[in-house]
Amino acid sequence: MWTYEKRLQFPVKITKTCPKTAQMIISQYGGPDGELSASMRYLSQRYTMPVKQVGGLLTDIGTEELAHMEIICAMVYQLTKHLTIEEAKEAGFDAYYVDHTTALWPQAASALPFTSIEFQSKGDAITDLTEDLAAEQKARTVYDNLLRMIPDAEVREPLKFLRAREIVHFQRFGEALEKTKEKLDSKNFYYFNPEFDKGMMKTEL
């Protein structure tokens, strides 16, 4: 059963219309390192994770990433809420406007649409957790880039919060990787899929 509070994990209160900023931030909705791909990645991987505690962590972080997706969507919405046609044209937001008006649609800052090819769920604990570590670092890098580009404090505060959570997630996945390795045969876990090839030795592959 889900308990859902009708509030964002971090408040978003943006008062200035800026489609150019929205066009950059939307990458963390539907871009290759965005919150949508993160949530789908973790919520998919959790089913085949052999260590129950790590599966629970993936559930928790995957659910939090959905909350982060809400924050990004709220930011893009508020940045375009009072958009005029002239502002859209001037900012280069006109192509997006033609396709979506000011509705939220997952794409990268480069306008490439979201695709599930941007994340993996391999059913291999070491592979998946290594990808998760890289995913959090890539997302953190995107937030770094956004913070370098955006001076508006109203926009920067939620971005700084989201960046901080990427760092925490990276730390938790590092701990999860070590916990998973403790449960596996240390001589073999780099050579085979510990979730599928249970007990298989390197020489048997």
Image (cartoon, rainbow, N blue to C red):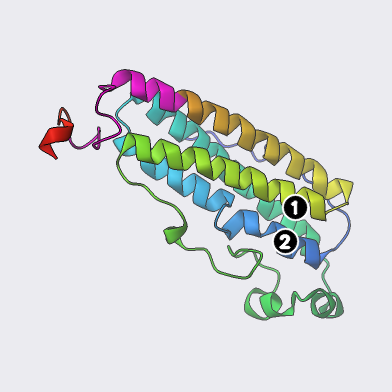
Q: Nearer the viewer, residue 70 or 24?
A: 24
Tell me which secondary structure the magenta stretch mostly adopts: loop
Q: Do callouts 1 and 2 mark residues in contact (Cβ within 8 Å)? A: yes
Question: Where is residue 179, by image quadrant?
Answer: top left
Count how many numbered circles sit on residues in the image.
Answer: 2
For the C terminus, give its image quadrant.
top left
148 to 175, vertically: above or below = below
47 to 107, vertically: above or below = above
Query: Label 2 amino acid?
Result: Met
Look at the numbered disc 1 and give the secondary structure of its residue.
helix
Residue shown at 77% from the left, 45% from the top: 12
Residue 178 lies, in percent from the top left, at 42, 23
Residue bearing mark 1: 146
Residue shown at 88% from the left, 51% from the top: 152
Residue shown at 81% from the left, 46% from the top: 156
Question: Where is residue 130, by image quadrant?
Answer: top left
- Please state the extent of the stretch shown in magenta in the rendering: 176-197
Left or right placement of residue 37 versus residue 189 in this view: right
Query: Label 1 amino acid?
Result: Leu
Rate crowding at label 1 as few (under 14), some (14 to 19) or many (20 or more) other CA atoms within 10 Å. Answer: many
Identify the disc placed on residue 195: none
Q: Which of 175 and 21 is in front in this view?
A: 175
Residue 52 drawn in magenta = no
Residue bearing mark 2: 24
